[in-house]
Amino acid sequence: MSVIIPATTGSGLQASSNLSSPQSFTKLIWAQFASTPTTLSDLIGAQNTAASTLAALVPVEFNSGKLSVSTGSGGGSDSFASQPTWTDWTCYALTGTTAGSGSLIGYWQDNAGGGFVSRSVTGVSFTNAFDNIGMNTMSVATTVAYYMEWNVVLTLTQLNAQFLSATPVITGASLSRYLPLAAATGAGADSSGNGFNMTINGSLTNGATLPTFPALSVPGAGPVPRTIFIMP
């Protein structure tokens, strides 16, 4: 199963301790929206106490129906080369490094594969108060699965490897959180071994579907399971 975040303000998962650094992080999640978002929705990110400064991947902030990389009120960009099909399972990722030009990068790749689409913006420096999945608002019900956080910036090669796996392939000290999001009950439990749980807010429910992963194939032999080894 997966987890559904309802279309209500303040629903989702949140951490106020063991927080990611806005200057060195990667966040990744799979999500499927019930329909095209038309008003502000926060998918994943980190924010200061006032939510005025943040590093977030936001479906719909600047223009209706578009994915945005956001740094706060009025800051960020939705100028991806293309936009996701919201009702498809899609892998979304956000990376941030030392604040500066191009330091905050958003990514998406559809369940069917085809490569990540990315957009970079100038990141900002702030004191992180909360790591969020949803929380500030979700304008449509959103099914989520396989949330992961690292305290380093993953390369595109590493993100491409992670796209093919429901569990972290980049492990070791750099892995901060792994929430399988397999059911609403216990959705905030961290399975990374660090115990960095997130708090459940609102009435989450169980989702009925999960992402599938593209498989390598050999002519006449059908799909071939992938085995991926990535050093920390």
Image (cartoon, helix red, strand yellow):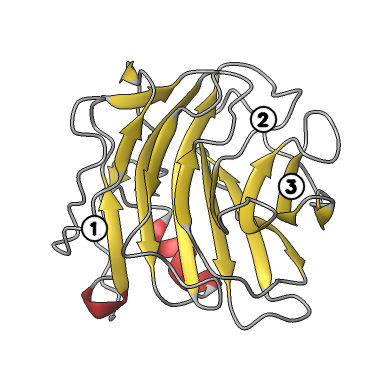
The residue carrying pointer 2 sits among few (fewer than 14), some (14 to 19) or many (20 or more) residues within 10 Å by Cα, namely: some
The residue carrying pointer 1 sits among few (fewer than 14), some (14 to 19) or many (20 or more) residues within 10 Å by Cα, namely: some
Q: Is residue 85 above or below residue 153?
A: above
Q: In this view, does 146 lie above or below 123?
A: above
Query: Which of the labelled discs sits on residue 196, or is there none?
Result: 1
The reply, left or right, for residue 82 in relation to residue 13 is right
The residue carrying pointer 3 sits among few (fewer than 14), some (14 to 19) or many (20 or more) residues within 10 Å by Cα, namely: many
Residue assigned mark 3 = 68
Which label sits in the foreground, 1 or 2? 1
Query: Which of the labelled discs sits on residue 85, or is there none?
Result: 2
Q: Which amino acid does label 1 sit on?
A: Phe
Give the image location of residue 142, x and y in percent: 50, 24
CB within 8 Å, label 3 to label 2: no
Q: In this view, does 31 lie above or below 143?
A: below
Residue 89 appearing in the image: no
Q: Which of marks 3 and 2 is nearer the N terminus?
A: 3
Q: Which amino acid does label 2 sit on?
A: Thr
Give the image location of residue 190, x and y in percent: 21, 51
**Quarter that holds the N terminus:** top left
The reply, left or right, for residue 45 in relation to residue 117 is left
Q: Is mark 2 on a helix, strand or loop?
A: loop
Number of numbered tags placed on the structure image: 3
The reply, left or right, for residue 126 in relation to residue 39 is left
Q: Residue at x 64, y 22 (%)?
A: 139
The answer for how far apart the CA atoms under marks 3 and 2 are is 14 Å
- Image-quadrant location for residue 95: bottom right
From the viewer's side, name the closer residue of 17 and 55.
Answer: 17
Q: What element carries label 1?
A: loop
CB within 8 Å, label 1 to label 3: no
Which label sits in the foreground, 3 or 2? 3
Q: Residue at x 24, y 32 (%)?
A: 182
